[in-house]
Image (cartoon, helix red, strand yellow):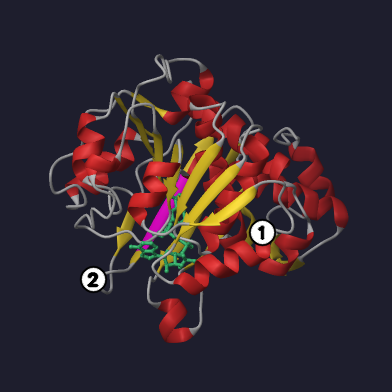
Amino acid sequence: MTVPTDRQCVADQLKIGSELLYLTRQDVERLALTREDILELTRQALVEHGHRRYEMPAKIGVHPYDNVFYHAMPAYLPGPGIVGMKWIECYPDNPQRFDLPQTTGLLVLNDVDTGVPVAVMDSAWLTAMRTPAVTVLAAAALHPDATTFGMFGCGVQGIEHVRYAAVALPRLKNVYVYDTNKAAADALIAMLQPELDLRIILGESPEAVTKSAEVLSSATVILRDPLAVVKDEWVTAGQTILPCDLNTFWDPRTARRADKYIVDSIEEHQLFASMGYFPDGLPEVAAETGEVLAGVKPGRERAEEIIVNSNIGMAVCDIAVGHAIMHRALGRGVGVRLPL
Ligand SMILES: NC(=O)c1ccc[n+]([C@@H]2O[C@H](COP(=O)([O-])OP(=O)(O)OC[C@H]3O[C@@H](n4cnc5c(N)ncnc54)[C@H](O)[C@@H]3O)[C@@H](O)[C@H]2O)c1
């Protein structure tokens, strides 16, 4: 799937300037973009980013409580002519306290020629999809022959990470999963084992998982002070580590001694560091994820390299996926038109 570019397609379906398309989470899901679609859309957005064909200020945020954040994530991709912004919330206690997801939000898309809003949609689904897409695109670039994958955190992101890893890593045989809430890991296995042609194994401990997998990812919680659950001593030559939760889960020494520390956005990581998220300082960055995918900078150069690739999430990926969702919805008559 390529990023749709034709403004006329939108203008044919929508009275630009007097109405916008509103898509609920259910609408977004029933449009049924496949994981392959999302991988391709995300890859294109990362390549644009790697070639510096974007405008995307680092996400700004507000923090009503200590452990929560709201992020405003605007972006512009001049190539396909997409502009928009995701407004996303992360409340780690939501599942226990309110039986609500940790992450919720909305995406707004605008008409780049006139600026007027053309669509507003739930962004929880696309966030759940584009985040693992970034992780596994990077995994496939940095460690294409991996047969083992370890996933820390078995919530929304963990589940999709395992599904996406199965698509993007063709030699994958064993997936190890671990969650402090064992019920979440058990539920992941019960849900995914029947649908995936690989073995999903309940990890005994973070140490056991770290020592079993070539490629590892984490999607747990994002905290200012690292939990350092995975000790640096457990990490060995040749491993690829792909955190989605900044530096929270990993011993900060690992990122510092890694042969390459790659991030999706240097600016985003610097902003988080300025807010106190890397109390030991941001490790030296070798490349951005998009630069590796675009072939602008090298990824893995030696089998024994330890590579840490932190992807905190980029609005360019959100708007690329959201734009494709909007086009499909307009084409299929899905969603509600609201007057502006
Ligand atoms: N990088 C990105 O682009 C991006 C995008 C979305 C979410 N996230 C982050 O990913 C994380 C997970 O999001 P989610 O929507 O899957 O949340 P979720 O609540 O659905 O799942 C999180 C899981 O992690 C588990 N967990 C918490 N602490 C743990 C620990 N110390 N060890 C092992 N497991 C632990 C929880 O029990 C839960 O099952 C959050 O921190 C979120 O901010 C990152």
State the predominant SS element of the stretch in magenta: strand
Q: Position of residue 18 (x, y in %)?
A: 70, 60
Which label is found at residue 323? Answer: none
Up-down: is 292 above or below 186? above
Q: Earlier in the sequence, mark 2 or mark 1?
A: 2
Q: Position of residue 259 (x, y in %)?
A: 28, 23
Residue 72 falls within the magenta-colored stretch: yes
Q: Residues within 10 Å of mark 1 (few under 14, many from 20)?
A: some
Q: Secondary structure at mark 2?
A: loop
Front-lying residue, 36 or 153: 153
Give the quadrant of the C terminus.
Answer: bottom right
Q: Which residue bears the numbered disc 1?
A: 192
Q: Nearer the viewer, mark 2 or mark 1?
A: 1
- Quadrant in the picture for residue 239: top left
Up-down: is 80 above or below 198? above
Magenta span of residues: 70-74
Which label is found at residue 66? Answer: 2
Up-down: is 105 above or below 288? below
Q: Residues within 10 Å of mark 2 (few under 14, many from 20)?
A: few
**Of the residues shown, which amino acid type is indicated by label 2?**
Asp
Give the quadrant of the N terminus.
Answer: top right
